[in-house]
Image (spheres, grey):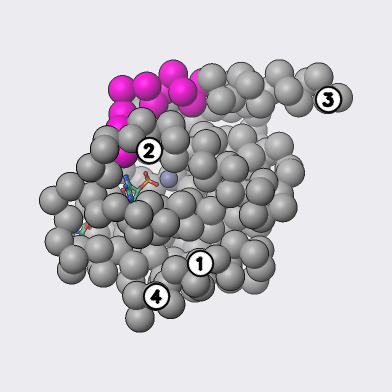
Amino acid sequence: SQEKLMQDLMKCINFCAIKHRFQKRKDPEGTPYINHPIGVANILVEEGGITDPDVIMSALLHDTVEDTDTTFDEIEKQFGAKIRGIVCEVTDDKSLPKETRKMMQIEHASVSSYEAKLVKLADKLYNLRDLQRATPLGWSEQRVNEYYAWASKVVEGLRGTNEPLENELDKILAMKK
Ligand code: NDP
Ligand code: ZN
């Protein structure tokens, strides 16, 4: 029902805000981290035309396990097995070295579920726009260029999922070529 949906959504936004409460983005202003997951969910609704609550709540939760003390069991208990599965698909294995994690994102993109591909597309779009808006503290131009190159490889594996999001990504990626 509409009431249940609104309850679930607000519970999810509140959960994410609490989990990310001490974190900031890498931009020079140190924007509150929660702006990112909310922005990713908003891209999916506003630009991707996505209204599946499992996808939107997974987008809100997508960095909680990777970047906070949140566990997959906690996500399943609070939001169910479907959302746990999507969040699991978009979470890097933090026990691996960063270079390996970056390679695995490229490898895993094309074999992800439709729902995970949507979250990955919106996440990359948000981060590339963020990079375009302001260079993170301490990042060289080369590092920015490397991020674009890596992101474009991940996006290659996500194609055929959502036209508007892919078109927006193409616009941003074309500017760096
Ligand atoms: P990343 O290069 O992965 O940082 C980018 C990530 O930071 C994004 O994917 C995003 O992830 C998050 N983020 C937070 N704030 C912003 C923002 N304002 N704009 C864009 N993204 C933001 O950094 P790591 O330290 O995790 O990875 C290190 C990797 O970087 C190494 O593997 C190496 O390849 C490379 N590197 C290159 C250097 C160079 O000079 N060329 C130097 C050091 C490292 P999320 O969605 O999770 O928030
Ligand atoms: Zn993210």
Q: Position of residue 30 (x, y in %)?
A: 27, 35
Amino acid, disc 3? Gln
Q: Is mark 2 within 8 Å of ligand 1?
A: yes
Q: Residues within 10 Å of mark 3 (few under 14, many from 20)?
A: few
Bounds of the magenta span? 15-25
Q: Secondary structure at mark 4?
A: helix
Of the two numbered discs 1 and 3 on the same chain, state the one appearing first in sequence: 3
Q: Which residue is mark 3?
A: 2
Q: Would you name the residue on which mark 2 appears?
A: 66
N-terminal of the two: label 4 or label 2? 2
- Asked if residue 65 can be seen in this view, the reply is no
Quadrant containing the N terminus is top right
Q: CA distance from mark 3 to mark 2?
A: 31 Å
Element type at mark 2: helix
Q: Which residue is mark 1?
A: 169
Q: Residue 170 location in percent, x, y? A: 51, 73
Disc 1/disc 3 C-alpha distance (Å): 33 Å
Residue linked to disc 4:
175
In contact (CB < 8 Å): disc 3 and disc 2: no
For the residues labelled 1 and 3, say whether their Cβ atoms are less than 8 Å apart: no
Pinpoint residue 80: horizontal percent, then vertical percent.
65, 28
Type of the residue with mark 2 = Glu
| Badge 4 density bin: few <14, some 14–19, many ≥20, Cα 10 Å | few
